Amino acid sequence: SRAKRYGKENKVPTKFSDVAGHEEAKRELVEVVDFLKNPTKYHQIGAEIPKGVLLVGPPGTGKTLLARAVAGEADVPFFTVSASEFMEMFVGVGASRVRTLFDEARKGAPAIIFIDEIDSIGRKRGAGIGGGHDEREQTLNQILSEMDGFDKNSSVIVLAATNRPDILDPALLRPGRFDRQVTIDLPNLKEREAILKVHMRNKPIAEDVSLEELSRATSYFSGADLKNLVNEAALEAGRVNKTRIEMHDFYRALDKITLGLENSSLTIT
Ligand code: ATP
């Protein structure tokens, strides 16, 4: 999700092999890849291709990465928008921007639209007295009507990420909208090992580095945290002019990160 927040990529290099763990999620998303690659197969047999899939899970667990992998595997253009930044960037024109985004995606179909942080637009409507958030509601309504308006054969699939499915407007979850959910949890022990491996792939790692030990020392780390850990260890090794990253560097990085976490929780609360 640190990638571009608004834009179109014609060719996405990401593949499922770049995503460690999340086997169940990948199994479900392989289907989406097939919808995008072989839409006529489904149309001919009279099946309607799902329009929306919600990726649900805590921050940094790889929702954006998975969405990109779907586009990469299907070899279709990837249209991204972060809902929160979208609201800031296009004050007063949210709804018309949504229209443009969907128009472009339809022109490029088959295609993926990825909406990050959908909860910032998609919270239950009319919660506050007098509604209040007209801008947000109009933007949400536009997303709903775009999805309803998809031609049966349009082959545009909208993936949306959230860590708060509970606060979403039920209208978003109705059949024909985001009626499928894929859960992306924090990685378990084995998955943390696999994620560490992915991020060590192109780095000079010393023989004394134990993936198992690191994985044990990082409960509750997300994929993004683990990626950061590997980078911090590399910085640590570089700082003292090593040519390989040793276990010691990982421990220093871990210390630094956990201290940082403590400090930040002290300053926030
Ligand atoms: P957010 O909710 O904060 O947007 P996210 O769930 O979309 O987070 P990503 O932005 O996809 O998470 O993850 C950040 C980075 O962490 C990824 O680009 C990737 O490098 C790394 N990462 C996260 N999960 C995994 C994973 N399962 N395998 C490999 N790398 C991962």
Image (spheres, rainbow, N blue to C red):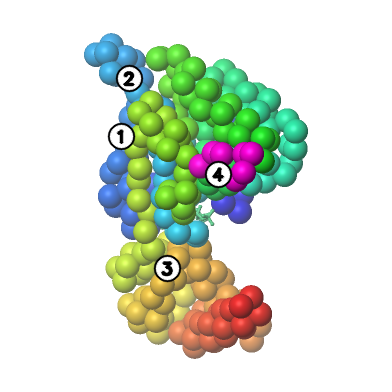
- Amino acid carrying label 1: it is Glu
**Which of the 4 quarters of the picture holds residue 127?**
top right
Q: What is the span of residues highlighted in magenta in the rendered image?
A: 124-131
**Which residue was labeled with disc 3?**
196
Mark 4 and mark 3 residues within 8 Å of each other at the beta carbon: no
Q: Confirm whether the magenta stretch covers residue 125.
A: yes
Residue drawn at (45%, 14%) of the image:
151
Mark sitting earlier along the chain (1/2): 1
Look at the numbered disc 2 and give the secondary structure of its residue.
loop
Query: Vertically, is 208 above or below 143?
Result: below
Foreground label between 3 and 2: 2
Q: Separation of disc 1 and disc 2 at Cα?
A: 13 Å
* Secondary structure under the numbered disc 1 in the rendered image: helix
Residue at 68% across / 35% down in the picture?
Answer: 135
Earlier residue among tags 2 and 4: 2
Disc 1 residue lies near ligand 1 with CB under 8 A:
no
Q: Earlier in the sequence, mark 1 or mark 4?
A: 1
The residue indicated by pointer 2 is: 48
